[in-house]
Image: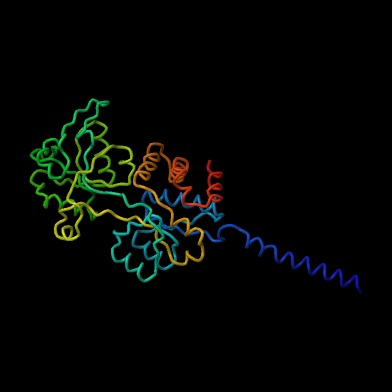
Amino acid sequence: MKMRRKLGIKVFMVILGLLLIPLSLAGCAAGGEEPLKLADPGWDSLHVHNAIFSFIVEHGYGYPPCEIVPGSSPVVLVGVAQGDIDLLMETWSENYGEAYTDRIESGEIVELGLNFDDNYQGWLVPTYMIEGDPERGIEPAAPDLKSVFDLPEYWELFKDPEVPTKGRFHNSVPGWECTMHNSTKLETYGLDEYYNDFLCGSDVALSGSMVAAYEKGEPWLGYYWAPTWLLGMYDMTLLEEPPFDLEVWERDKGCAYQAVRCTIMAHPSLLDRAPEVVEFLRKYQTTCAQNNEFLRYMQENEADATAGAIYFLKEHESVWTQWLPSDVASKVKAALP
């Protein structure tokens, strides 16, 4: 009888132990069981930030590979607010306007940090036009060109082959909001008298016009923005405009574009579900120059976003290790190829 009782107790303990094993393993496991969902509105720098984040949370925190959720910017904002998407790593917050700020105030979304805020957009010329390039045998053609207000003096340098009585300003793509802004700026600055407003048919046509001119060492004037691989590869100078002023901007666009805060936006549930990831994201910060750099690397090497992320993690270890606890950073470093 005693033997049966002892045997029964042993069997009970074994069964109890087997039942407790999954619970103990779950309690000790790093990271979450469900993949985090990252938004993808579709541009290259965001793809790299998604890949950087995914590599760190998978190898450093033990999460499963992240799930990428594609969608336009407006759709993504709603998706994060509704909890269908956890995170947008590169949120051009001012572009959303009140749709963003209202959701922040209502608590539908939270802003975890600032990815970068030194991005820019505006009118550019190759720096060799101002400073020359001795290695390429290029003399400075417009040494005093600093501002948009200097452009009337130099219109002949940028002569439009289709409208030879004017220079050519390479505007962006029809339908883009910035294209309309640039057209208004030309009129406001009185430059429509000197320059033809040349609308490029596509982003490829716009970037291709810059590349073609730069490779030949020829003049080029047009609109572009950073971060992009182009401005990581080519030395371009942003022409000065009056500082951004909201009243002036709303009246006639007669000032510089507003700098945009590229933030990290998340659904508030992430605060409780992944507090260690939230802590890491609050420290996550890059620069426009670093973004240009990894985008240039990808372009030169025909590399994808994952390769761009690995490049960043290898080249800027002193940056990202500051975002993480030392033990997590060690795991990430050990996982790098």
Residue at 78% over, 65% down: 14
From the viewer's perspective, tell me whether residue 235 is left or right of residue 143.
right
Q: Is residue 138 above or below residue 211?
A: above
Please state the horizontal and vertical placement of residue 184, each as a whole percent of the image: 15, 53
Please state which of residues 1 and 304 is positioned toward the viewer in this rendering. 1
Q: Is residue 254 left or right of residue 294?
A: left
Residue 224 location in percent, x, y? 25, 46
> Residue at position x 28%, y 63% from top?
97
Q: Position of residue 16 (x, y in %)?
A: 74, 68
| 213 on left or right of 160 | right
Q: Residue at x 41, y 37 (%)?
A: 301
Which image quadrant for residue 221?
top left
Task: Name the residue at 9% across, 43% down.
Answer: 194
Quarter of the image where the N terminus is located: bottom right
Compared to residue 187, the image places residue 136 above or below, namely above
- Percent of width and height locating residue 81: 40, 67
